[in-house]
């Protein structure tokens, strides 16, 4: 069951969205400098997408790798039918002209969407983060039990005391071994989603939900379209329409690109096609708008408004409505965060400034970004699905 954005507005986030709906429009109308081109292609690295008529992708991939003498990176069977590989120019031309190939995408870079961080702290008595308070999650009887959420990010620290009991499994698609987090970003996102309701640290919006740690970014927060598609391939294989448990996925990351409004089939966008296929497996996909203070039209996956729920960031220093909280370095209380991307692809706004959550080394940290806003909406989807299975 993929949830369209319009369902979540009355369900859980009306208080937050009433602020966002006004400021997103005004921000988009401002005169701002053009976005810097972030479509950073990875030389010699490509994603080969087979046509739907291919019945034996394993055999075709093996034959192509043998003939082209390329180096395989990932194989895809669920979000896409195809593979990623390093190829020379001659091999590229051969595959582009193969009648069994739908298209070939150049691989591109992506990275985490984080603004600035604060100091790391040791766990103390449990704290209610402002974002959780803002949507009143702590007062809900619904805690997200039975809903599985995939976090496509830098991984999750699997032994963190606030997370370990909620981690159902994972997948590593990035350099390194395992899906445990070596950066902190993915662990922070996971804490907002499902930190355990106990006596220490923080509590998540859906503390009874289960987490899947899908590591698609390296320890520096960098990755590629091919690694993101690897994660989407794993998630799609476990989508509800394929008999799996994962119903929601969070992607707090971005790179350069645009939306063809045709799931990538018009502009040969393999990432867009993979996200559409994951959506079609019944997964609600929530993504960060980006932190460049520019239009989401040039940032993906935020621009894919035919397939994702895109979330911008609000300042919220006191966790309640009214705009009476203290000012922040990114704007006044209850206003649009100065770093947040804007535009017609944005569906919702949620707290994304000075968000306190879990961190690596079993710690906690406050950081800001649309990456921090996105998991609040991911959780809204999880709670909605828990109540409406």
Image (cartoon, helix red, strand yellow):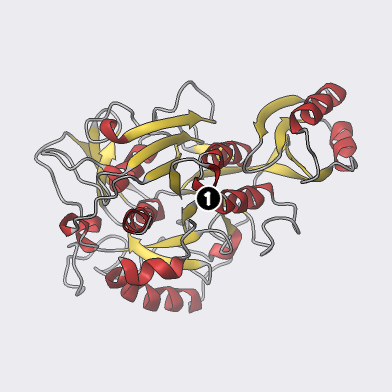
Compared across the picture, whether 301 is left or right of 167 comes to right
Q: Can you tell which quarter of the image residue 98 is in?
A: top right
- Whether residue 118 appears in this view of the structure is no
**Which residue does the image show at 26% across and 53% down from the upper left?**
354
Compared across the picture, whether 126 is left or right of 82 comes to left
In this view, the residue in front, 95 or 121, is 95
Q: Give the total number of marks visible in the rendering.
A: 1
Q: Where residue 286 sits: x, y (%)?
A: 46, 55
In this view, the residue in front, 162 or 315, is 162
Provide the secondary structure element on which disc 1 rests: strand
Q: Which residue is mark 1?
A: 254
Is residue 361 placed above or below 128 in the rendered structure?
above
Q: Where residue 207 sits: x, y (%)?
A: 25, 45
**Which residue does the image show at 17% across and 55% down from the upper left?**
138
- Whether residue 106 appears in this view of the structure is yes
Question: Callout 1: few (<14), some (14-19), or many (20+) C-alpha neighbours within 10 Å?
Answer: many
Compared across the picture, whether 201 is left or right of 340 comes to left
Q: Where residue 369 sits: x, y (%)?
A: 37, 53
Q: Where residue 19 sits: x, y (%)?
A: 32, 74
Q: Can you tell which quarter of the image residue 160 is in?
A: top left
Quadrant of the snapshot with the C terminus: bottom left
**Which residue does the image show at 60% across and 60% down from the upper left?**
298
Is residue 55 placed above or below 383 in the rendered structure?
above
């Amino acid at each position: 069951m993929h949830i369209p954005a319009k369902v979540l507005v009355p369900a859980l986030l009306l208080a937050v969205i009433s602020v966002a709906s006004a400021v997103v429009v005004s921000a988009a109308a401002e005169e701002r400098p053009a976005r810097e081109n972030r479509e950073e292609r990875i030389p010699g690295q490509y994603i080969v997408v087979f046509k739907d008529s291919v019945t034996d992708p394993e055999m075709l991939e093996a034959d192509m790798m043998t003939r082209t003498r390329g180096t395989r990176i990932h194989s895809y069977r669920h979000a896409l039918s195809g593979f990623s590989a390093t190829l020379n120019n001659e091999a590229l031309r051969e595959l582009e002209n193969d009648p069994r190939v739908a298209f070939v995408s150049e691989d591109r870079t992506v990275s985490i969407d984080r603004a600035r961080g604060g100091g790391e702290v040791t766990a103390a008595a449990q704290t209610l983060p402002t974002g959780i308070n803002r949507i009143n999650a702590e007062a809900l009887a619904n805690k997200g039990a039975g809903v599985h959420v995939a976090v496509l990010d830098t991984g999750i620290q699997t032994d963190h005391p606030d997370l370990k009991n909620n981690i159902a499994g994972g997948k590593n698609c990035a350099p390194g071994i395992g899906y445990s987090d070596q950066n902190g970003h993915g662990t922070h996102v996971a804490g907002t989603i499902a930190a355990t309701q106990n006596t220490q640290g923080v509590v998540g919006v859906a503390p009874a939900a289960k987490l899947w740690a899908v590591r698609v970014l390296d320890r520096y927060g960098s990755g590629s379209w091919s690694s993101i598609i690897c994660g989407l391939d794993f998630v799609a294989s476990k989508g509800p329409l394929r008999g799996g448990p994962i119903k929601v996925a969070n992607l707090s990351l971005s790179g350069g690109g645009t939306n063809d409004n045709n799931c990538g089939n018009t502009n040969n966008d393999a990432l867009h096609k993979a996200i559409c296929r994951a959506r079609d497996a019944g997964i609600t996909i929530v993504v960060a708008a980006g932190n460049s203070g520019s239009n989401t039209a040039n940032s993906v996956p935020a621009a894919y408004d035919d397939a994702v729920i895109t979330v911008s960031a609000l300042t919220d220093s006191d966790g309640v409505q009214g705009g009476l909280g203290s000012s922040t370095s990114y704007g006044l209380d209850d206003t649009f965060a100065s770093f947040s991307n804007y535009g017609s692809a944005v569906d919702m706004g949620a707290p994304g400034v000075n968000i306190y959550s879990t961190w690596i080394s079993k710690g906690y940290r406050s950081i800001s970004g649309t990456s921090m806003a996105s998991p609040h909406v991911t959780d809204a989807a999880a709670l909605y699905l828990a109540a409406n299975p």
